[in-house]
Image: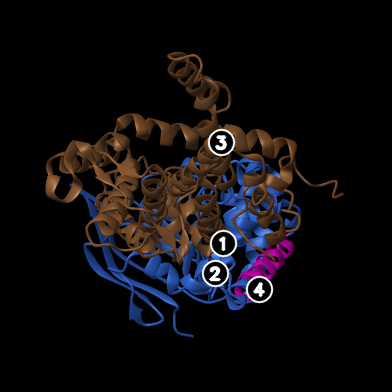
Chain colours: A brown, B blue
Amino acid sequence: MNSQAPPHTRAHWAGGTRAFYAAPLLALAIPLFSNPYTQFIVNLMLVYVLVTVGFNLVLGNLGQLAFANTALFGIGAYATAMLMAHAGWPFWAAIVPAGMAGAMAGFLASVTALRGIRNYYLAIVTLAFGELLRWFYIHGEAATGGTDGLAVPRSDFFGIPLDSETARFYVFLLVVTVIVKAVSNLLRSKIGRAIVAIRDNELATASLAIPTGRYIVLAFTLSGFVVGVAGSLFAVLIGQVIPESFGLLELILHFAMVLVGGLGSLFGGVLGAVALTALPEFFRPFPGFYEMFFGGLLILFLLIQPRGLSALFAKRWPALRDRYYRDS
Amino acid sequence: MAALLQLAGVNVRFAGLQALSNVDLSARGGEIKAVIGPNGAGKTTLFNAISGYVPIAGGSIALNGSAIHGLAPHEIAARGVRRTFQNGGLFPELTGLENVLAGLHARIDASFAGILFGSRAARVAERDAIARARRQLEGLGVSHLADAQVKTMSGGQQRTIEIARAVAAEPPLLLLDEPAVGLAPPVRAQLVELIRRLAGETGIAVLLIEHAIDLVMAAADVIAVFNGGAKIAEGPPAEIRTDPAVLEAYLGHV
């Protein structure tokens, strides 16, 4: 032990990549213990893991108050539903285009940020963008099915029929693991460091030969891709894509997941998604209580634990801290 | 030896204020040149002009003979001009090691796809950069700060990390903006030694803005004195100490 070591030193992530895969490997066994209802909730958790991980890239890592997340989520869901319902594409073929559509929208949102529209202004512009899209979902009936929405046809994943929660679970788990691992790789590299550096001090970041504008665009675009894929999974899980799913309430849920899990923490994002997807289910027998509890929980976290669950865990187990480099 | 950095007739104007007027200044490898002057003399504006943070209204700034004025800050940094900031330019949430790694950003040769999929080449490039950043911290005697978040460090520790980050990519030119502000005297002495060692060992050219005259006299080979946006004198410390214009404008008030 180095006696000179100051407090708050970050310990290393023991085992590195191997530890990363422990969670999805253990999760493989979940269907052994689940019924269709609990399995549906677990599948929804996986969708929200991507929602939160994607949102956190812009909100937590880049530190930009962009609230286009439900818009990106909706774009991914509608793109999937339209490709499958109108064009007859299989689900597997629609995932990447849904992500690309989200990435495109994220890219557009980044242009506003690049033009110096930041903070509250960016929040308002992106909120308005989400509401504009909802208007389009409601009024673009020929493409979107209007307020009734679009039914997502039965789907398969490279021949595996996705007609049960268990089948969907394995496909979702694969997609989520691949994407979260890729995001983790990015964050623990020069790219992740550049994005967090911009959040901490944009001017100083440029002084290190880091093209800040390019990384702002990259963070928004990546975020859009991840959340777009989440929308794609959501469409297939719910089976019906309707405008109400992508309103302000949904945005507050996404925001709460990031906040409760831990702003800027990949691990926190996963925690927040799992915790806040499971929570409403416990309140099912007590209608009306959930909203109260949810509001109270948010206030509690903002006041007492503003850095979220991940900071609590990291305090106890330093190995769980987020690192922005990779030596394995 | 030809100058590494050459400013000729540089003018900077802010809404009606002439912040720099007709400044000629050069910097040479292995030489430490202090830039001194009272508050508002244009010292930090000079640094901001060189590193691309404020546009110049006239004149030219050349690095190794080619013009760098008009380039974006990250482009100028990529050509080898690195700087520190007066009121702390570190990334507080990142650790000492991660800050220095950010300084090596452009030196890490890893493609986007390579990073995304964790390719061997990307991991090797990252590992090399980590080894290099650790050597840098060790060389400056702060390897114990590698895993500490910057926001938990003392002022002196932060200054050292910022210098480590600025020199990590071995830039030919280093601009230090008041590195000794708020440091205890023994730490200041270490800082002087550190700056002298950098210039002596690596042949880096250093421009140093500093208010602490004792530090300037101890560290600098040449001193350039600014007042009201203009350079009023330049020469070795012994000469500057007795220059009447300097005494009038600056030293007389200390």
Q: Main secondary structure of the magenta part?
A: helix
Query: Residue at coordinates 23% horizontally, 54% vertically from top-left?
Result: B13
How many angstroms separate mark 2 from mark 3 (CA)? Answer: 33 Å
**Chain under numbered label 1:** A
Total number of numbered discs in the rendering: 4
Q: Is residue B47 above or below residue A200?
A: below
Report if the CB atoms under discs 2 and 1 are less than 8 Å apart: yes
Report if the CB atoms under discs 2 and 3 are less than 8 Å apart: no
Residue B78 part of the magenta segment: no
Callout 3: 10 Å neighbours few (<14), some, many (20+)?
some
* Residue hosting label 4: B128
* Residue hosting label 3: A38
**Chain under numbered label 3:** A
Under mark 3, the amino acid is Thr
Under mark 4, the amino acid is Asp
Image location (x, y in percent) of residue B243: 46, 58
